[in-house]
Amino acid sequence: MRRAVIAVALVILCLVAGVALWRGSQERLVEPAQLVPAETLLLADFPDLPATAIRWKETELYALCQEPQVQGFLAKPLAALQHNESWTGTLRSLERIQPQRAFLAVVSVTNNMPRAVGGFAYKEDRAEVERLITSARKQFQSASPEGKLERLKHRDFHIESFSEKGITLAGCFARHWYFVANDVELLKATLDRFSGKTHAALDSAPAYQQSLAVLPPHADFRLFTQPGAISERLLARLNASGQLFDPRESAALGKLRSVALASRLEGKRMRGALFLYEPEMPPRPVLNGKTLSLTTSNTLFYAAMAPLISDEPLQRGNPQVFPSLIPMRTLLAALNSPPATLAQFKTAFGPEHALLLDWPVGGGAPNLFLVCEIRDPAEARRFMENVFRAWNRADAEGVSFWTLSVDDPTMAQFHPTVALTAHHLLAGLSPESLKPFASNAVHPPGAGATLERSVAYQGAMGTLPKPQIGFAYLDAKPVFERIYSFLRPAAILWGNGIANMNGTLDFTQLPTPEVIAGHLSPMGLSAVQTESGILLESTGPISFLELGEVLGAAAVGVALPSLGGEPFPLPRKRLPGILPPAPTTPLSAPGKDPASAAAPEGPPEALN
């Protein structure tokens, strides 16, 4: 009997332990997309923080951060952080908490204020989480002594909120999760979804399901956004201020259902994927690689694409019209009259267009130029002779060059040139920059002399899907070495003199080009069209997608201080055959009643 009681007790104990383990695993497996509504505007998710921390230490960027010269440059700010008790205390708390996952979601925007909710899952030591939350609450109360602290109960959850001048911050524990939101009702709805009390979450939205099905699995970071509501709000505000979008461009924005991004650390390199979910997108032309034949062993950057350009012209004449989303329209609109239409351009050129950067070893200036494949040679020549007839023309070895002479001493080295060969249209900054490539177009080099035969190119592109509608390649090491070597002396002068960093950074300790470039390698990007949108994948020591995120954030940071200033002055002097006179009414001026607006200048088919 005693043995039977012991056996039964052991079975019950095992069952209880199994249930506890199952519940714990379920808590950790909860998906943030299950906690936010289907109409959520943006969701950022770090799915597995411990695994990300391990993989991060294997990357080239981490190795770069450990370089003695980099550590020496950052020594002062790192020492300041180490002496900051708040910072070091937070790091110690995070080590004890062991966060497992984190997310942040912007659910909606009301009265220009985003409604956001976020949270993180922790492995153990709730007491440490509570200590961290208590410290943050005290800081809020100290900074806003007039704020109101409230504690309320919602189902089995205990919510604590702090409000001051219409701004609220509410938090709540839910088993091994801690959630925080700037709206109490939003936090309650999140807790209801966490408990399975409600449905209609983001994970059931078709756009979310389609996007994540295409992205690579096991990402270290995921970002999902539905730009429809954001673009509608932006367009409404622009239209209200008189900066009008063309209706076709507004409709094009509305067709983009969602944008999803995933990043993963893979050994020394990173892989990024970006998916544009647009089921109604028509098929895009497939690249044929004909512009790749113009590359050389000195080509450090190459990007090719097959853009879709609408044949329908935009209406011209209203100075309040917001600049076109497709720069080619504005370019063609500004050329000589009679204007060239996009239909004529598409008939003559395409489907492949490319941007190339050649930079010879051992010095010399970089050579950046555009290339378009010729579809119809006769139509291409008629197009060029019509559009560039005011430019100076010269023919040599079967190639026609059109050059614009700028009568301005400050632009003496600027002589925009276009060249037409039997198979390509080239555009560069001077005749001399185009002649070697025009010669390659007439007399193609051997297969081994082009970029696609190089080991660096094949290594960067070999792990990516075969490109269909676009791809890019950057040999990051030599490009960085040459640009950084040029900018480093100016950065030292700026940092220690003009910027006056108060001793927090010693710019004379900037790492040498060789130290940083030693951790760089070629980067590749491939774009393919799926049944429901466009998928871009990139890989490198930092992928094109992560690089774009960094540069975009930096550009926003630089531009924000100037948003309230005067608009940048447009040039008033007309360049022969390329730019029309600038409108006398600034683009930021209040819009007039369309019925009273002046009649548009020029023929109705002109493009803007």
Image (cartoon, helix red, strand yellow):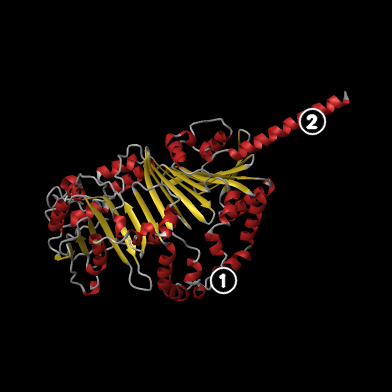
Query: Where does label 2 land, which residue?
Result: 10
Residue 461 pos. (x, y %): 42, 53
Q: Residue at x 40, y 52 (%)?
A: 525
Q: Is residue 173 above or below residue 482?
A: above
Q: Residue furthest top?
A: 1
* SS assignment at label 2: helix
Say few, some or many: other residues with alpha carbon within 10 Å of mark 1 (under 14 / 14 to 19 / 20 or more): some
- Dividing the picture into quadrants, the one containing residue 382 is bottom left
Q: Residue furthest right?
A: 2
Q: Is residue 545 above or below residue 403?
A: above
Q: Amino acid at mark 1?
A: Gly
In this view of the protein, which residue sits in the foreground, 390 or 316?
A: 390
- Whichever of callouts 1 and 2 sits on the residue coming sooner in the sequence is 2
Q: Residue at x 41, y 61 (%)?
A: 475
Residue 255 pos. (x, y %): 33, 39
Query: Where does label 1 land, which residue?
Result: 72
- Dividing the picture into quadrants, the one containing residue 155 is top right
Contact between labelled residues 2 and 1, with CB atoms less than 8 Å apart: no
Residue 258 pos. (x, y %): 40, 41
**Is 26 on the left-hand or right-hand side of 203?**
right
Is residue 125 in view?
yes
**Is 30 on the left-hand or right-hand side of 480?**
right
Q: Amino acid at mark 2?
A: Leu
Q: Which mark is residue 261?
A: none
